[in-house]
Image (tube, helix red, strand yellow):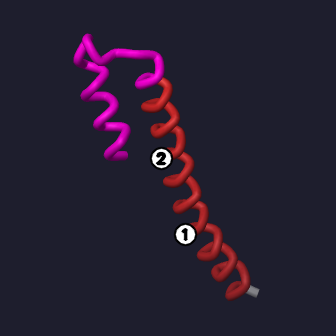
Amino acid sequence: MFRVASGLVQLTNSSQRTWDLTGATLADCWIAIFIMLAMSFGLIVPKLVVDYISEQ
C-alpha cells in the first residue's frame, strides 16, 4: 500500500509520469488487493468451518 501511495504521488508530478511508473503502480495496487483478499479469506473460511462443525 505504501508503494501504491508513493507511485500515485509520483504520478501527480508531470515530469516523472512514465508508462513504467504507471505500470509498476498498477501492479503494486493489484498485489495489495490480492493480499488483502487472501488475508480475508484466510480469516473467514476457518471461522465458517469451525462454526459448521460445531453445529453438527
Residue at (47, 47) in percent of width and height: 32
Rendered position, 52 above or below 31 = below
Crowding around mark 2 (Cα neighbors within 10 Å: few <14, some 14 to 19, many 20+) is some
User: Over which residues does the magenta segment extend?
Assistant: 1-22
Q: Nearer the viewer, residue 39 or 10?
A: 10
Magenta span contains residue 16: yes
Tell me the residue that label 2 is attached to.
Answer: 32
Tell me residue 42's x, y (percent). Answer: 59, 67
Crowding around mark 1 (Cα neighbors within 10 Å: few <14, some 14 to 19, many 20+) is few
Rendered position, 55 above or below 17 = below
Magenta span contains residue 38: no
Tell me residue 28's x, y (percent). Answer: 47, 39
Tell me the residue that label 1 is attached to.
Answer: 43
Task: Answer left or right for 13 relative to 46.
Answer: left
Which kind of residue does numbered mark 2 sit on?
A: Ala
Tell me residue 17's x, y (percent). Answer: 34, 15
Q: Nearer the viewer, mark 1 or mark 2?
A: 2
Q: Nearer the viewer, residue 49 or 27?
A: 27
